[in-house]
């Protein structure tokens, strides 16, 4: 995906190793990531570029993170997740009170940070699923990238092999996020894709697709059953 079409994240931390690790990890998750090491460098970056979310360390040389949050919240209104080695509740409370969207104490699990990023972006109205453009039709959900034009699915950099039926079903779901689809709805949309003429074929196809994209098929995160109604595709989820 072109960087101009990716969600842009700016990491502000004077720990170069943390910046490097976060940039590598978030880049693998499909974000466009940059890093700076101070409030001055942050201002210089924002004067020339933009960010959809800022990951901000509390302890910085010069202007500290709390001061930066307060200042940015009154001007640019970019969502902010604060990081700090200080795990005291008072730091978390102050950070949230002055405008930070979330707070995570160091050391932290990158997957937890990723879940918090998605939660903040969702609350701020930034869509988790995005088309890159009308020609390529590239969608992202969780760790997955689904390209409709070349009929491929990747989890991070690893290709997930889909049958034509699984591809057709996933295409329907990503194009109808959060909409409850009955078996009849799915059968109707699957016509022309060699769908068997009985409704249980949908259940089998969903079971097989879940085996390829769900970490636990007994508690699916993406393709969820709505009892008595059908199925619903949830493109993002909050890990607690």
Image (spheres, rainbow, N blue to C red):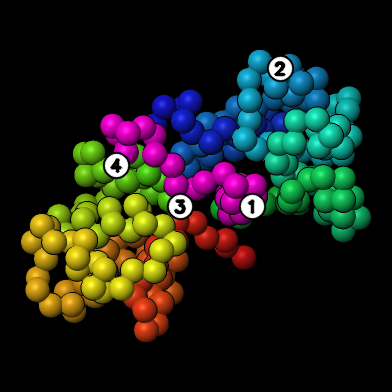
Q: Which residue is mark 4?
A: 147
Q: Which residue is mark 3?
A: 142
| One can see residue 153 in this view | yes
User: Quick check: 73 left or right of 36?
Assistant: right
- Is 173 located above or below residue 64 in the figure? below
Quadrant of the snapshot with the C terminus: bottom right
**Residue drawn 47% across the image and 42% down it:** 29
* Secondary element at tag 4: strand
Q: Residue at 41% across / 63% down in the picture?
A: 179
Q: Which mark is residue 200?
A: none
Quick one: label 1 or label 3, which is nearer the N terminus? Answer: 1
Q: Is residue 31 left or right of residue 189?
A: right
Identify the residue under disc 2: 47
Mark 4 vs 2, N-terminal side: 2
Residue under label 1: 123
Q: Position of residue 216 (x, y in %)?
A: 40, 70
Q: Is residue 18 above or below residue 87?
A: above
Q: Element type at marker 1?
A: helix
Q: Position of residue 176 (x, y in %)?
A: 36, 57
Q: In the image, which residues are magenta? A: 114-137
Cα distance in 3D space between marks 1 and 3: 16 Å
Do the numbered discs 4 and 2 sit on residues whose CB atoms are within 8 Å? Answer: no
Q: Secondary structure at mark 2?
A: helix
Label 4 to label 3, Cα distance in Å? 14 Å
- CA gap between label 4 and label 1 equals 26 Å
Residue drawn 28% across and 32% down?
Answer: 135
Q: How many other residues sit within 10 Å of disc 1, few (<14), some (14-19) or many (≥20)?
A: few
């Amino acid at each position: 995906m072109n960087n101009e079409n990716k969600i842009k994240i700016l990491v502000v931390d004077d720990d170069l190793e943390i910046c490097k690790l976060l940039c590598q990890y978030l880049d693998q998750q499909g974000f466009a990531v940059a890093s700076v090491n101070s409030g001055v460098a942050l201002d210089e970056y924002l004067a020339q570029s933009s960010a959809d979310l800022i990951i901000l360390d509390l302890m910085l040389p010069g202007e500290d993170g709390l001061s930066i949050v307060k200042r940015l919240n009154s001007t640019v209104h970019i969502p902010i997740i604060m990081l700090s080695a200080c795990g005291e509740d008072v730091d978390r409370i102050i950070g949230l009170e002055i405008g930070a969207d979330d707070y995570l104490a160091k050391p932290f699990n990158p997957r937890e940070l990723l879940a918090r990023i998605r939660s903040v972006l969702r609350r701020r109205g930034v869509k988790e699923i995005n088309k890159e453009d009308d020609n390529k039709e590239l969608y992202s959900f969780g760790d997955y990238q689904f390209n409709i034009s070349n009929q491929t699915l990747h989890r991070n950099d690893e290709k997930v092999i889909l049958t034509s039926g699984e591809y057709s079903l996933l295409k329907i779901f990503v194009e109808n996020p959060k909409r409850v689809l009955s078996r009849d709805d799915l059968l109707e949309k699957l016509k022309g894709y060699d769908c068997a003429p009985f409704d249980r074929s949908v259940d089998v196809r969903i079971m097989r697709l879940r085996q390829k994209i769900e970490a636990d098929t007994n508690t699916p995160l993406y393709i969820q059953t709505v009892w008595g109604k059908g199925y619903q595709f949830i493109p993002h989820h909050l890990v607690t």
